């Protein structure tokens, strides 16, 4: 099963960290990717550009509405993701608990990837 | 440039409907999703896409004072929830917008396009 771990953090808090703290946190993110890869549990991982670089697209009554900025303005925003391949959600949660944002006031949302019933059979 | 296309949509219309009705609705919108996948595949043969299970199946993980705290449900209790993600390599934002408009969920939800960070 695949599980998408969505990394939510506070970009302001990240900005207030010292250079050394940021380097250490960044190394923490890399370590999760390295360890999960070594365990055969990582499918993909990426960091997203800040929400200031986001573009939102909606289509209403056949008309495309394009706006600058993220879908929702919030104190904590999606900063990246890890796509894990695990036997259970508990295992994905264990990986999620190693992600630095979980330790620094942020949160990791773990979501099972949808599998079509016929594909799972 | 690599982009993540985040598909946000209200999942409440799917709550409380029968499995048959859900299957019928999925089948009804399927041709448009297939058309989208074809367009995405033409733009980037290596495009990755994942549909997520319902947000109610989410678990949120925090570590407080060294202890892992896990709660059920999504991080944000909003009406619209992340329902899927595409990650794709495209020439520019305009192309990402063109493809986002083709996503059926853009008609009832929101497509958020975010460049992937490069270091």
Image (tube, coloured by chain):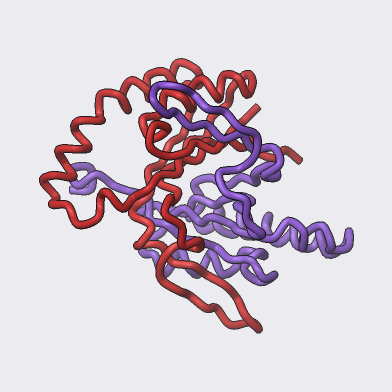
Left or right, B30 with respect to B101, comes to left
Check the image and name the residue furthest to the front.
Answer: A61
Q: Residue at x 88, y 63 (%)?
A: A18
Q: Is residue B34 above or below residue B11?
A: above
Q: Is residue B68 above or below residue A53?
A: below
Q: Quadrant of residue B90?
A: top right
At horizontal 66% and vertical 59% (from top left) the residue drawn is: A75
Q: Position of residue B113 (x, y in %)?
A: 57, 35
The quarter in which the N terminus of chain A is drawn is bottom left
Question: Quick check: A52 left or right of A70?
Answer: right
| Colour given to chain A in the rendered image | purple
Q: Position of residue B83 (x, y in %)?
A: 40, 46
The tally of labels here is 0
Report the side of B113 relative to B42 (left or right).
right
The colour chain B appears in is: red
Residue B90 in the image: above or below residue A83: above
């Amino acid at each position: 099963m695949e599980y998408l771990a969505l990394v939510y953090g506070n970009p302001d808090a990240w900005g207030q960290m010292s250079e050394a703290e940021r380097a250490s946190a960044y190394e923490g993110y890399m370590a999760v990717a390295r360890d999960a890869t070594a365990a055969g549990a990582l499918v993909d991982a990426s960091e997203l550009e800040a929400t200031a670089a986001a573009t939102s697209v909606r289509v209403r009554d056949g008309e495309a509405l394009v706006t600058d900025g993220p879908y929702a303005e919030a104190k904590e925003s999606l900063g990246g993701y890890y796509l894990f391949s695990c036997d259970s959600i508990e295992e994905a949660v264990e990986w999620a608990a190693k992600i630095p944002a979980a330790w620094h006031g942020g949160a990791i949302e773990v979501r099972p990837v949808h599998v079509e019933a016929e594909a799972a059979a | 440039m690599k982009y993540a296309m985040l598909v946000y949509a209200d999942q409440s219309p799917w709550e409380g409907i029968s499995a048959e009705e859900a299957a019928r609705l999925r089948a009804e919108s399927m041709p448009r999703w297939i058309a989208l996948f074809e367009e995405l595949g033409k733009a980037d043969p290596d495009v990755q896409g994942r549909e997520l299970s319902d947000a109610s199946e989410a678990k949120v993980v925090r570590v407080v004072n060294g202890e892992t705290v896990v709660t059920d449900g999504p991080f944000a209790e909003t009406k619209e929830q992340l329902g899927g993600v595409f990650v794709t390599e495209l020439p520019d934002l305009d192309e990402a917008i063109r493809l986002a408009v083709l996503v059926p969920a853009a008609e009832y939800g929101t497509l958020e396009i975010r460049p992937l960070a490069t270091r």
